[in-house]
Each structure stands twice: as C-alpha cells, then as structure tokens.
Image (tube, helix red, strand yellow):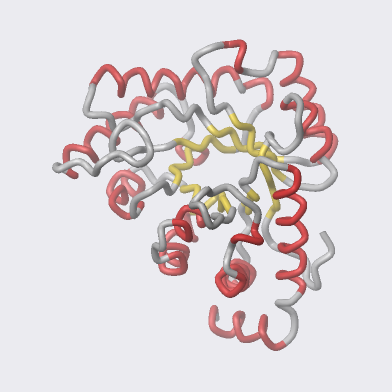
C-alpha cells in the first residue's frame, strides 16, 4: 500500500480469497498483506484442514515475508452453551484446531462466544449464568496451555461489553468486528474507543442491501470508515486490520478503498485527529 503516511497497523485478509487451498491463498497474498486470517471454520474432520506439509509451507512463507497469522477457530464451538455437553465439545473443538495449526505457529486465536449455540440465538434470560459458562470455557482453554495474550474474543451479534467481566478478568484481547457493529447499527465508535487498548484484530467488511455481510468496503459508509481510520492512526494502533471478505472482487475493492481513505487522511484532517487524541 502507498498511503500518504505510513500506517501504524498491519493490513490483513482471510485465507479464502482465491479458489484453491490455504497455501495457494497465502502464496498469492504474501506480498500484498501483513497478516492472513487462517480460517478453520470446520474442525471436526481432519479432511477439512490443511495437511501438515501445507502448513509447514505456509510457515516458510510467513518467515520469508514477515507475515503474521491469525487462526479463526471452528464456528460450531459453543463456549457458553446451556448444554454442558455442547460447551465441553466446543472447548475440545477449539483446542483441536489450535493444536492442528501449531506447525504454522499462529500469532492469535479468534474464538466466538455466542449468546446461545450459534450466532442469532435468543439472548439468555440469566446473563450471570451465561457469563459463568463462558468463564469456565475460557478457563479450560487457558488451563490447557493457551496463552491469554493470544486468545481473542470476537465481537458478534450483541454488545461485547456484556462479557467484560470475563474479558477483563482474564485480561484477554478482543477481535473487534466493526463490520458486525455497522451491520447491527451498534455504537461502532463508542465500542472502538472502549476496546481499542485491548484490540489485537479489527475485522472489517461491509453489509449489502440484502443484509449479507462480509462484502467489500464499498458497502461500508465512507464517513464511518474515515473516522475509524483517523482514530486508529491517531492512537498509533499497531494491531491488525483484516479485510474479512471471502471473494477476490471484494478484496480488491476493499484494498483500493483502504488505500484511498488512508491517503485522504493527510494534512489538516489528520492533524485534527492527532490533536483530539492528545
């Protein structure tokens, strides 16, 4: 990227941009991004994961190009389920994914903590009991050897501040999905300010007119995009901004807009942001 000012953060995207394997995607992305979000959305079957040889090749590319890697753990891991069986199975699925990915040595692990067993479930009546179940799952992951500094809890379809007692209690980082915040018309900038000190990944995407998310940034409001970038640059945010899209067209358009928007934040506009931050 050739923005007017060097960016303090790393730019990333997902391992599902091009048709082909994880390795094929990392090979094509290695000279264009700083981080690749390795998607292990399905973790119950070894055939749904890259081979060890493929992962070792990705590790070589990582070293050669100075990449960082962020592992997205399986979507069917229900870490706060009301079912003890499902919750225990969810912990096991996350641990298996982390163990399987070890040849690549990911820098971060992204986990979902649903209100129920999946995104979109009805909020639980007893939030204290829900937080307790989530806390027990997080404790089990950490007790198994997962470093808390690498375990990123993702913003989903609810206000992540509901989980603050657990996040703060274990000093966990977060993966702040600003695409979800914009999709759900939540307080994007308020939550960004609240979580930025512990945010390691910002997942960014747009939502089209049908309500489908993970589309290109041409579906994200420009005013919100520039305000967010101004905040990140002013705060010298050094984590990852990952373009969480899954199609080449969406990736290319998002990269173009990111470069355009960051380049436009030079001069007086950026100075105002830096002064406000001070």
In the picture shown, does residue 71 fall above or below 90? below
Residue 204 vertical position relative to residue 153 in the rendered view, above or below: below
Residue 78 coordinates in the image, percent (x, y):
35, 28
Counting the numbered discs, the total is 0
Image position of 121 (left or right of 258) = left
**Viewer-proximal residue among 211 and 233:** 211
Report whether 100 appears left or right of 61.
left
Rendering quarter of residue 121: top left
Horizontal placement of 80 versus 190: left or right? left
The percent position of residue 40, horizontal first and vertical second, equals 57, 27
Identity of the residue drawn at 60% across and 31% down: 39
Residue at image position (23%, 23%) is: 83
Which residue lies most toward the front here?
210
Q: Residue 120's x, y, as percent?
A: 35, 41
Q: Which residue is located at x 60 percent, y 68 percent?
A: 225
| Residue situated in front as seen by the camera: 264 or 251 | 251
Q: Residue at x 76, y 14 (%)?
A: 53
Which quarter of the rendering shows the N terminus? Answer: bottom right
Residue lying at the far top in this picture: please name it. 46
Quarter of the image for the C terminus: give it: bottom right
């Amino acid at each position: 990227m050739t923005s007017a000012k060097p960016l303090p953060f790393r730019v990333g995207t997902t391992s599902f941009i091009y048709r082909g394997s994880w390795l094929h995607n990392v090979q094509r992305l290695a000279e264009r991004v700083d981080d690749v979000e390795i998607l292990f959305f399905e973790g119950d079957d070894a055939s749904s994961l890259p081979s060890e040889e493929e992962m070792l090749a990705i590790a070589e590319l990582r070293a050669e190009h100075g990449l960082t890697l962020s592992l997205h753990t399986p979507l069917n891991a229900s870490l706060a389920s009301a079912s003890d069986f499902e919750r225990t199975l969810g912990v096991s699925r996350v641990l298996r994914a982390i163990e399987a990915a070890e040849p690549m040595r990911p820098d971060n692990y992204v986990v979902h903590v649903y209100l129920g067993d999946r995104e979109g479930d009805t909020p639980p009546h007893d939030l204290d009991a829900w937080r307790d179940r989530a806390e027990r799952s997080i404790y089990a992951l950490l007790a198994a050897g997962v470093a808390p500094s690498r375990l990123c809890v993702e913003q989903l379809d609810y206000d992540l501040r509901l989980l603050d007692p657990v996040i703060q209690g274990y000093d966990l980082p977060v993966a702040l999905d600003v695409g979800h915040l914009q999709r759900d018309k939540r307080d994007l900038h308020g939550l960004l300010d609240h979580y930025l000190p512990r945010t390691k990944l910002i997942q960014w995407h747009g939502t089209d007119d049908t309500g489908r998310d993970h589309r290109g940034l041409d579906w994200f409001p420009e005013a919100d995009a520039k305000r967010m970038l101004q905040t990140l640059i002013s705060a010298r945010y050094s984590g990852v901004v990952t373009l969480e899209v899954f199609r080449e067209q969406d990736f290319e358009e998002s990269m173009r807009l990111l470069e355009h928007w960051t380049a436009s934040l030079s001069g007086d506009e950026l100075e105002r942001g830096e002064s406000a931050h001070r």
